[in-house]
Each structure stands twice: as C-alpha cells, then as structure tokens.
Amino acid sequence: MTQGRRRSETRTPSIFWALALMILPVINLAVRFKITDADKFPRAGAFVMAPNHFSEIDPVLMGVVSWKLGRAPRFMAKASVFTIPVIGWMLQKSGQIPVQRGGSVRGSEPVKAAQRLVERGQMVVVYPEGSLTRDPGLWPMRGKTGAVRIALERGIPIVPVAHWGAQEIMPRYSKRLSLFPRKTVLVKIGEPLDLAQFRGRNLDPGTLNEATTLVMAAITQLLEELRGETAPDKRWNPAEHDQKETGRFEA
C-alpha cells in the first residue's frame, strides 16, 4: 500500500478518539489554526516531529495539529504528569513517553521507548530545546541532542515545525489560560530533514551537536517566516547564562 493511500491514523479506533473527544471541542472554540505547507507533514511512516517550545500549552496545540494532519501524536512528557489519576492512565495507554527531569538522554528508557514507536512506523514528538526556551524574545534556544539521536539511530527524518501565537493563550511560565476571545495560532511545517550527511559517522557529541544545530536553524528559519522578524545572531545558550549568573560552570 502506498503512503498516499494508507489509512489515516485518526480513522483507526484507539484511545486517541477519547482524547480528541475531550480536547478538540474546547481547542476548536478557542483556537484558529493557520497551517502553512501541511503537505510536507508525513501522512505515514516513522519520523521525529521537532517543534519550537515557549509555552506550557504547546504540547496540546501541537498534538491537535498532528491530529488534524492525520497522525496520532506521541510525546516525550514529564514523568510527574503520569502520576495524575485518569490522565496518567490515558497518557500511558496512548503511548506517551515519561521522562524524568534531569535524566540522561543517551541510552535512556525514553529514547528506547521512542525507538519502539519508530519500529511500528509511528511518529514521536521531541522538543529539541528540552524545555521552554529561555530566550527573552521567545526564539528557539540551543538544542539538545535527543531528537537527532533518535533520527540517526533509526534512519528516519526529522520534520522541523514552528508555531506562533501560543503565548496569547498561555504566556511562558504562566498557569493561566486565556481561551477567549478566540486566538490564532500560526503553524509552518518544514521540509523533512533526513540528516544523510551524518549517517555512517560515530554518534559522538560533536556529530550530534552538529546535526542538532542544523535542526535548530531550520526551526528558527520557519519561525522567522511566521513572525516576519529576524532572530538574534547568537542562539541563547542556558549553560553560558547560568555560568554568568552563578560565577561558575556546571557540566
């Protein structure tokens, strides 16, 4: 069966139907999505979706975008969320991946779980920044290597995605939602990056950081197009700023 004729994941009965029934009515009332280049979003097969991250509401919005484009989203999510009654059970049943704060990426259970999704031809959403950006202008900060490690180890593409508008619904670090009046969220899908130039190389820190830099550059360019602005020349590096604030370097 060809990719174009394969049945959409959203049409296959699953626990995602229950999640969509709870989430979509509220989001559709509160948010108007304007998705550019939706045809670049793979409708079948395994891939890593790599969006920018600047609001706590981002995973919900990106999950809805994925669903609207015909894919069931599976995220790496904070392990603490899985302890919440009912919600934690639904997250586990829908294949979401718990990540312990401060846990190592290399050889970790989250990466192994993501690889199992890949083996089943499913997508996995990984925020390359690892947390909400700390850049004052909400531009993507320096990325971490988990997304490219999964892509390179499994030989699958990364699809960079940028979105803008979530800060109007839930500002960074805020716990307060502003659902009305209805907000517009702009989304731009990038060309899948297959990272072919890095295959066959040792996945040492140098290779992984080089590949991650390309991914972050692609996400940033998409965001520049959405915002009609130019990002700072130098990407925000949390480690450098922590060093300046504490007067010491922490590895």
Image (tube, grey):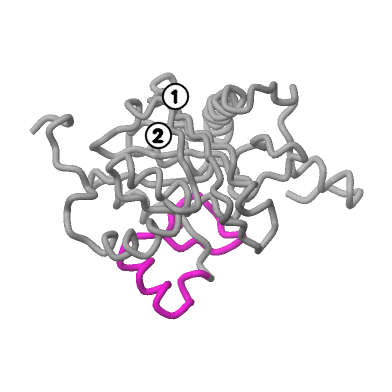
Judging by the rendered image, the residue that carries numbered circle 1 is: 198
Residue drawn at 39 percent across, 77 percent down: 86
**What segment is highlighted magenta in the picture?**
81-110
Residue drawn at 72 percent across, 45 percent down: 134
> In the image, what residue type sits under mark 2?
Leu
The answer to whether mark 1 and mark 2 are in CB contact below 8 A is yes
Q: Position of residue 102 (x, y in %)?
A: 61, 59
How crowded is the residue under tag 1: few (<14 C-alpha within 10 Å), some, or many (20+)?
some
Disc 1 to disc 2, C-alpha distance:
8 Å
How crowded is the residue under tag 2: few (<14 C-alpha within 10 Å), some, or many (20+)?
many
- Disc nearer the start of the sequence (1/2): 2
Vertical position of residue 112 compared to residue 195: above or below: below
> In the image, what residue type sits under mark 1?
Phe
SS state under label 1: helix
Q: Nearer the viewer, residue 76 or 4?
A: 4
SS state under label 2: helix
Q: Position of residue 168 (x, y in %)?
A: 64, 47
Tell me if I can see residue 205 in this picture.
yes
Residue 10 colored in magenta in the image:
no
In the rendered image, which quarter is residue 150 located in?
top left
